[in-house]
Image (cartoon, helix red, strand yellow):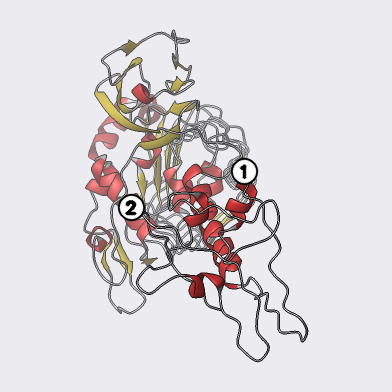
């Protein structure tokens, strides 16, 4: 204030007298009316005013006609600490070149539709310490040059984070302060997808957030990357467990019951043989002058387009085509900024099988297991559910039909042959009755059991070899 007063005495405003509004101090193109107990904007305002300070007054309403003429040179407007509760949607139509707007420490409750749309050149917007509870998603339309947005210490329960999703609505935004509001949940997936230079200045501390593991992993990644929004406010990053009445530190959730959260590895990408993947260089730096990648084998990828399977894209990402097992490893992205340099690491895991579509055949191991189970089931059905061919009918005994000593009869002999039944006696398996005690269903190697004589050209049946196909199931007698 004394400095402005000294400048006023040396400026044409002081010598000219009445051109400067009452209770204001004017110096060059600066007009300071702070702490002047004003209830409205003083008039007339010089058209060449570049900085207008109306802070610490009683201007409760900012109407569309507060500046009757176009103030083409005004680039800073300070209206903090005024008890301001209403701002017209046309209030900024006459100040199109405004770059700095301070509406902090007032009583604003709603940011209405297209409220700041006339401020296409606005760079800094201060709205902290108000009573804002609702934010229209179009309130910040046309703010293509906005770099800093301060909304801390309000009553916001939901902020339209879709404004940041694709970077087209607020392309220059580098700082968003949502601290000390009433946010209970966050779209962690969308926040993690934001560029690192925006996450570095995304302040979320002081909100009554509900504890969960995705939230912990988001904050833990920020600490690992040493993002300012996490490193500067670790103690204020709190959340609430369902069973606890007091808040706990988000970073203290690691291994803590009942959530038992574990940190997820950052920048780990999994792929399969033959895939094409893109490794992102997620740097915190703005205005990057140059960047290059170093492969696990030490090869530098410098030029856009590249050679072979590695190509540097226009946005600084590295594309790998037709992945091979030797492509796995840790890749490094070297970034040179205007003031600082940064190195980022991305670990690539290449699985040694090709990932196919949803209609491909089953995995070989799974197919083998299913085949084995089906084989066992079929064998059991074949052994235990074969009907007993008992001949219990009355009449003359019929001799068994002659059988050819061919390979077919040898294969079929795996099923026990049943003898001709006698009326009144239970059915018995031929294998059980034809073997002697202790033989366990095998013929003795050195001996030849005597078979009853048969008639016909093939009356004598050869003895089965113990190692032939017919002896596969002969170790276990089957009794039905």
Please say if 136 is above or below 282: below
Q: Toward the viewer: 418 or 288?
A: 418
Q: Position of residue 5 (x, y in %)?
A: 28, 36
What is the crowding at mark 2: few (fewer than 14 residues within 10 Å), some, or many (at least 20)?
Answer: many
The residue mark sitting in front, 1 or 2, is 1
Left or right, 434 with respect to 25, comes to right
- Residue underneath mark 1: 358
Q: Position of residue 472 (x, y in %)?
A: 47, 56
Q: Toward the viewer: 70 or 465?
A: 465
What is the crowding at mark 1: few (fewer than 14 residues within 10 Å), some, or many (at least 20)?
Answer: few
Q: Position of residue 21 (x, y in %)?
A: 45, 41
Please report the residue visible at 24 percent of the width from the left and 57 percent of the height from the top: 251
Please report the residue visible at 58 percent of the width from the left and 58 percent of the height from the top: 413
Residue at the extreme right of the image, as rendered: 395
Please say if 18 is above or below 306: below
Can residue 190 be seen here? The reply is: yes
| Mark 1 vs mark 2, CA separation in Å | 31 Å
Q: Give residue 74's mark.
A: none
Please report the residue visible at 24 percent of the width from the left and 52 percent of the height from the top: 233
Q: Give residue 217's mark.
A: 2
Left or right, 29 with respect to 61, comes to left
């Amino acid at each position: 204030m004394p400095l402005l007063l000294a400048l006023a005495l040396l400026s044409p405003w002081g010598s000219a007298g009445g051109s400067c509004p009452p209770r204001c101090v004017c110096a060059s193109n600066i007009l300071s009316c702070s702490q002047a107990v004003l209830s409205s904007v003083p008039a007339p305002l010089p058209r060449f005013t570049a900085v207008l300070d109306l802070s610490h007054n009683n201007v409760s309403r900012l109407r569309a006609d507060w500046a009757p003429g176009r103030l083409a040179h005004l680039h800073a407007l300070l209206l903090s600490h005024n008890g301001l509760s209403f701002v017209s949607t046309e209030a900024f139509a006459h100040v199109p070149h405004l770059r700095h707007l301070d509406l902090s420490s007032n009583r604003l409750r709603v940011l209405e539709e297209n409220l700041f749309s006339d401020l296409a050149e606005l760079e800094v917007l201060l709205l902290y310490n108000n009573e804002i509870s609702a934010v229209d998603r179009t309130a910040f339309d046309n703010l293509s040059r906005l770099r800093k947005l301060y909304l801390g210490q309000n009553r916001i329960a939901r902020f339209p984070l879709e404004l940041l999703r694709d970077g087209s609505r607020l392309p220059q935004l580098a700082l968003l302060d949502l601290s000390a509001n009433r946010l209970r949940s966050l779209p962690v997936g969308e926040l993690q997808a934001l560029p690192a230079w925006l996450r570095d200045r995304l302040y979320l501390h002081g909100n009554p957030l509900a504890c969960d593991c995705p939230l912990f992993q988001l904050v833990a990644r920020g600490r690992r990357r040493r993002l300012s929004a996490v490193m500067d406010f670790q103690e204020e990053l709190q959340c609430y467990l369902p069973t606890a009445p007091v808040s706990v530190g988000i970073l203290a959730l690691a291994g803590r019951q009942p959530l038992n959260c574990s940190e997820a590895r950052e920048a780990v990408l999994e792929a399969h043989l033959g895939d094409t993947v893109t490794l992102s260089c997620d740097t915190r730096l703005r205005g990057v002058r140059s960047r290059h990648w170093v492969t696990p084998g030490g090869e530098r990828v410098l030029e856009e387009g590249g050679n072979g399977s590695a190509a540097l894209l226009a946005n600084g990402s590295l594309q790998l085509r037709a992945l091979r097992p030797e492509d796995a490893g840790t890749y490094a992205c070297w970034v040179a900024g205007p003031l600082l340099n940064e190195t980022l690491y991305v670990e690539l895991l290449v699985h040694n099988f090709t990932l196919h579509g949803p209609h491909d055949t089953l995995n070989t191991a799974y197919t083998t297991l299913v085949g084995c189970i089906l084989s066992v089931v079929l064998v059991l059905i074949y052994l235990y559910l074969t009907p007993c061919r008992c001949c219990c009918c009355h009449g003359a005994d019929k001799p068994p039909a002659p059988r050819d000593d061919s390979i077919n009869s040898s294969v079929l002999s795996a099923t026990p042959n049943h003898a001709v039944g006698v009326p009144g006696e239970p059915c018995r398996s031929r294998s059980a009755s034809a073997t002697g005690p202790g033989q366990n269903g095998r013929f003795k190697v050195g001996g030849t059991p005597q078979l009853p004589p048969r008639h016909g050209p093939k009356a004598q049946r050869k003895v089965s070899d113990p190692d032939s196909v017919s002896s596969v199931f002969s170790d276990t007698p089957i009794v039905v």
